[in-house]
Image: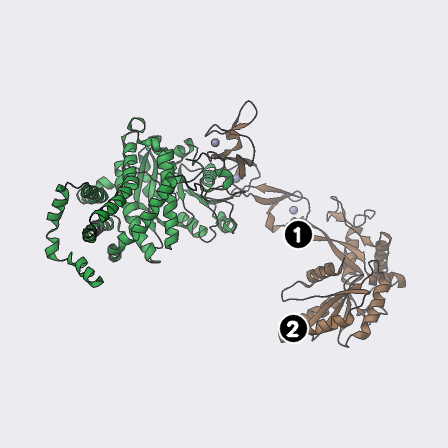
Chain colours: A green, B brown
Amino acid sequence: MISGYLDYLFSYLEWGTLSQMPRVLGMMLTSADPYFWLLFLIMLRMTLPAVVLWGVNLLRPAALLPPGAEAAPRLPLVSVLIAGRNVAETIVPTIRSALSCGYPNLEVIFVDDHSSDDSVLQARTLERTGRVRVFGADAHTGKPGSLNVAMALARGEYLFVLDADSEVQHGAIPSMLAHFGDPKVGAVAANLRVRNALENWITRFQECEYALNVSVSRLWRGKLGLLSILPGAGSMFRASALRAMGGYDSGLGDDTDLTLRLRKLGWRLGFAPDAVVWTDVPNTFSWLLRQRSRWTRNMVKIRLHKHGDLYHPGRFGLSNAMVFADLFLLRVLLPFLALAGVVVYTAMEPLAHPLMLTGLYWVVIFLLLARLLVAHDLLRTPGLARLWLVPFYPFYRLPIRVAEGISILRELLRIQLWHPYVPRRIWERIPHW
Amino acid sequence: MIEVDQKRYIDVLRRSQSSGGEMRPIWNPRSDRGYVYDSALEHQEHEMLWRDLKNLADLDYLEQDFFNRLTRCPSCGSHHLSVREVCVSCHGPNLHSVPLLHHFRCGYVGPIHAYGKDDHGHRICPKCHGTLEHLGTDHDHPGENWSCRSCESSFQVPDVEALCLSCGTTHAGANLVHEDVFSFRLSSLGAAALRHGRLFDSDQEQLVEEGTPIYRRSIFLSLIEDERRRRRRYAIPFGLVIVRPDAEDADDEDVFAMARRLAPKLRDSDKIGRLDRAHLLLLFPSTDAAGIEIALSRLISPDLRSAAVAVREGDDTVALLAAARARVTR
Ligand SMILES: [Zn+2]
Ligand SMILES: [Zn+2]
Ligand SMILES: [Zn+2]
């Protein structure tokens, strides 16, 4: 039975089957069945931006460079802001990587969020470099508050917010600064890459995922002015823009929230693919699911509940409305429609279902391969040696999708809103979106 | 020992006795050391008394107790130091510290002066315009931040530096010279010396207290060090026990009586030594922990208190004995 199915599965790779593909696609396109159209649209939305990006890079590579790249070299003071709690293991290498990333005019401010380990002592060993300042908070405040403390102490013209367990690659800071040549740019996201990719298969998959959903996606979004998240693990801000807003808001989802507030004020956001920041990703599946659940809940909380008014093109501009519509379709509506479709089709034609899924599987694999090759060509990540993961990638994404779906429902139904990320005493004082 | 010294030492002991058995330091900023032991003395006599007290303590006639600690200038030795916070980068003392306030509701953090006030005197958050009412419930104080007016540095922990008012040099806090200041109490040996009107410096007297089996304190401490060395090199164990009369108001005579009662119960190699006026030590060479248990059970009697003192490698003997003394004190 199983070997029979495997025969069938691999029969798709035979020339006889492959040569039928255009005909099948034509059938899908002309089909009156809305489900095929839905699938087609999802695939188009997932694949087209990457393919277009690849084409642009091929024909006019200069179009992908930051606008102000040729501007005369200026070396403004950059403050690296790091907030952390119980990060004694990683804080020293993180600060050291920032100090030695090749940018001369730099200060590092580490705000310790009342750690119970010796994070403060560890970090203070670097204070005698004269470029590092350590602030140990007297009480647990949460990350946004700690970053605001760091911001209050910073003197730089630009603020580079970094996670306490990351590593700045040489040359990252000038790559980001280049974007600020445009006075309308308020912030620039660094290119996050997975440092512990070789640890196990979970982190290897995440490397592919980051390449697609973080690097490539931010590259075209940045170009189109549709960037909607500046990662807390590595983003640079114009200090005056951040100060004018009073810094981060308390509560969950701080980086998304800050990004959308900048967008609402009309700041442009950039993405610097050459500014690489290495970060560690979860190395167990349960940790990964918890992380994604938190992200998803924060997405709903911040984007739908707190900044739901972004959809209004008359108020915050067309690009903000597009960001909102894209997100709503892609992250909320489509997953549920897709799920509903699977249920409906299984009920209607139980026997045709495995065959259809198999066909769909091969299409997905093919498109995924195309996107990964684009990512590799544009950004040299993931390595070609990682492509053997492709056939298994859908099975890695499926449980994540399910967990995300559950989180969306839980957040929409407002089940267990509190997360220990925010200390209780502060939670009790903030508005709950 | 020279006759003149003898006489002067006896004088010092007598002075201790007449001032309640104890010579305590008296702070005196005009003296060279910053303190004296007798305000009635002439200037140059202070140093002489200071050295006599130290010597008498070394010779076991006085017991010295830690009283306080002074810092001195490493350049000139003066105690006229002004210790203050200085800038971490330019070492200037022209600093001011600014408390930061954190508003929970909106997360804003800023220096206290960034917050305005409303008609009721409550602070207003510059970000969300909310009112700050109770420290700790709706806002808090994440810490202090120092700024330097000379070089615009900013830091949370300033350096500490001392300015010497005598020679004008400045020194980092870590480089200052520390001097422990002691008070001195008459020991039992000192009291005996006063009774006899002389110091005990014949060969036999330099080992044990006159007319008793009790080794003098300094001798006994060096015996303990010998045992520790032997244990380290040859792994030969030894035991140490602290004893004192049970009576809280035991006098020298009670302690001597206790020592005389204990002596016949000990082996020839075991030794009795002085810790201080009320406390004696027993040293058991070549005896392991089990042996000490047996010895203790033999020594136990209702009129004395005792405890085994575990000496581990690296322990400081004097600190260890102070802790042991606390264990047998009520
Ligand atoms: Zn506020
Ligand atoms: Zn200074
Ligand atoms: Zn001096």
Label 2 beta carbon within 8 A of ligand 3: no
Subunit that carries the residue with mark 1: B
Disc assigned to residue B231: 2
Say which element carries label 2: helix
Q: Amino acid at mark 2?
A: Arg
Viewer-closest of B176 and A330: A330
Viewer-closest of A391 and A374: A391
Say which element carries label 1: strand
Q: What residue occupies the far bottom of the structure in this picture?
A: B268
Screen quadrant of the C terminus of chain B: bottom right
Q: Which residue is mark 1?
A: B178
Q: Amino acid at mark 1?
A: His
At label 1, counting other C-alpha atoms closer than 10 Å, the crowd grade (few under 14, some 14-19, many 20 or more) is some
Disc assigned to residue A355: none
Tell me, yes or no, whether the two marked residues, 1 and 2, touch with CB atoms within 8 Å: no
**Residue A284 location, quadrant:** bottom left
Residue B75 image position (x, y, % from top left):
64, 49
Viewer-closest of A243 and A321: A321
